[in-house]
Image (cartoon, grey):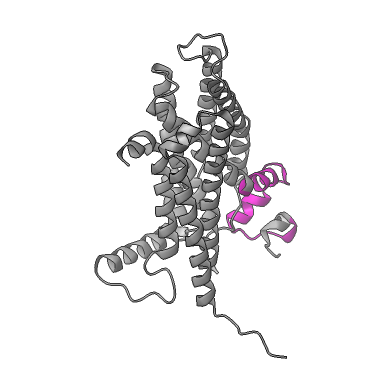
């Protein structure tokens, strides 16, 4: 058991995270209509959560899921190419690694430095473009994250999960540039985090790519007006938003 | 002809939660099983290695599906 934990802890942490997330979503006290009344610390936590939720949305109810402001959509689409490139070059790196190296050993572990640096460069570009996109979130990225947690909507939670998973991915990626070692714990964490990250990214894209394309290339102001809850005519708003006018 | 008994939303929610819990438990056990030392030993063979990773990925997907089911059910 000790050996299992010592060898595979990065993998098991993600499994544990998934199980904890499940219990939080399914059995959180105060969530269901048939739950018993809350007491003590749990009641206090529920009250604080409710208070944070009302503070996070002082003006208007949450916009429909999958709606995106035009400026955010454009920045998101800009990051899409490098993101796909990062996944693709990561896949190439993994392929070279599991096939036992390229035969042109340069980096000390069978993978040419060129491939590593191309992957690192594209990933860094993707990360910068994602930061650029997040900077456009209003009022601030942290408020957006807090709202996402308070709103308790799965697509928003997946976006937060994607953001959180990016942290170990970027840190281990940077560390591996200085100390490349295919069999190390760092490489293992990077690999596992990248798989979870790719899964979450796919979920995120499935939810938002269509909406982003509509918002970015639709007629002038339609999505923004709908999101700002302005008085707009029916033809100004995409049909998918379901706003009558 | 006898009418089908109707279930309440709370019963529906409980059923969905129970099913989702079974999925999560199965996925977690599958993931732990697949990283056990003897499976790792077998995974020196490339075919077994990729099969092992395919199942690990499937376990993650199953966990995501369970999360989605329970989230949808509790928001209804």
Q: Is residue A158 magenta?
A: no
**Residue A75 location, x and y as percent?**
59, 36
Region of the chain picked out in magenta, as a range: A207-235
Q: Quadrant of residue A90?
A: top right
In the picture, which quadrant includes the C terminus of chain A? bottom right
- Rendered residue at 42%/19% (across/down): A181
Q: Quadrant of residue A49?
A: bottom left
**Residue A175 location, x and y as percent?**
39, 23
Q: Answer whether residue B74 is visible to the viewer in this image.
A: yes
In the picture, which quadrant includes the N terminus of chain A? top left
Q: B7 and B33: which one is in front?
A: B33
- Rendered residue at 42%/43% (across/down): A14
* Vertical order, B8 against A48 (above or below): below
Which SS type dominates the magenta stretch?
helix
Q: Answer whether residue A60 is visible to the viewer in this image.
A: no
- Rendered residue at 65%/51% (across/down): A223
Q: A120 and B35: which one is in front?
A: B35
**Residue B61 location, x and y as percent?**
55, 48
Q: Is residue A229 magenta?
A: yes
Q: Which residue is outermost to the left?
A: A40
**Residue A121 location, x and y as percent?**
53, 20
Q: A220 and A187: which one is in front?
A: A187
- Rendered residue at 63%/30% (across/down): A81
Q: A30 and A14: which one is in front?
A: A14
């Amino acid at each position: 058991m000790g050996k299992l934990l010592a060898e595979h802890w990065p993998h098991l942490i993600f499994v544990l995270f998934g199980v904890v997330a499940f219990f939080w979503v399914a059995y959180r006290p105060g969530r269901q209509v048939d739950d018993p009344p809350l007491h003590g610390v749990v009641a206090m936590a529920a009250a604080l959560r409710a208070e944070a939720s009302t503070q996070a949305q002082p003006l208007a109810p949450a916009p429909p899921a999958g709606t995106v402001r035009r400026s955010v959509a454009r920045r998101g689409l800009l990051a899409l190419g490098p993101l796909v490139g990062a996944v693709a070059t990561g896949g190439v790196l993994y392929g070279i690694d599991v096939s036992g190296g390229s035969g042109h050993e340069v980096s000390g572990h069978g993978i040419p430095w060129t491939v590593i640096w191309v992957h690192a460069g594209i990933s860094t570009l993707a990360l910068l473009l994602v930061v650029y996109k997040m900077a456009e979130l209003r009022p601030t990225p942290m408020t957006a994250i807090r709202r996402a947690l308070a709103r308790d909507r799965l697509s928003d939670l997946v976006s937060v999960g994607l953001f959180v998973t990016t942290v170990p991915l970027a840190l281990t990626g940077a560390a591996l540039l200085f100390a490349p070692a295919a069999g190390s714990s760092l490489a293992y964490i990077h690999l596992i985090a990248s798989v979870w990250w790719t899964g979450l990214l796919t979920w995120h894209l499935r939810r938002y790519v269509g909406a982003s394309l509509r918002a970015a290339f639709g007629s002038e102001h339609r999505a923004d007006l709908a999101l700002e809850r302005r008085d707009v005519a029916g033809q100004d708003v995409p049909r998918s938003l379901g706003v009558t006018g | 002809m006898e009418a089908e008994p109707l279930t309440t939303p709370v019963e529906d929610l409980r059923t969905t939660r129970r099913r989702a819990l079974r999925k999560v438990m199965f996925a977690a056990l599958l993931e732990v099983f697949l990283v056990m030392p003897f499976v790792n030993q077998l995974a020196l063979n490339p075919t077994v290695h990729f099969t092992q990773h395919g199942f690990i990925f499937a376990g993650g997907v199953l966990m995501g599906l369970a999360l989605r089911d329970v989230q949808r059910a509790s928001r209804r």
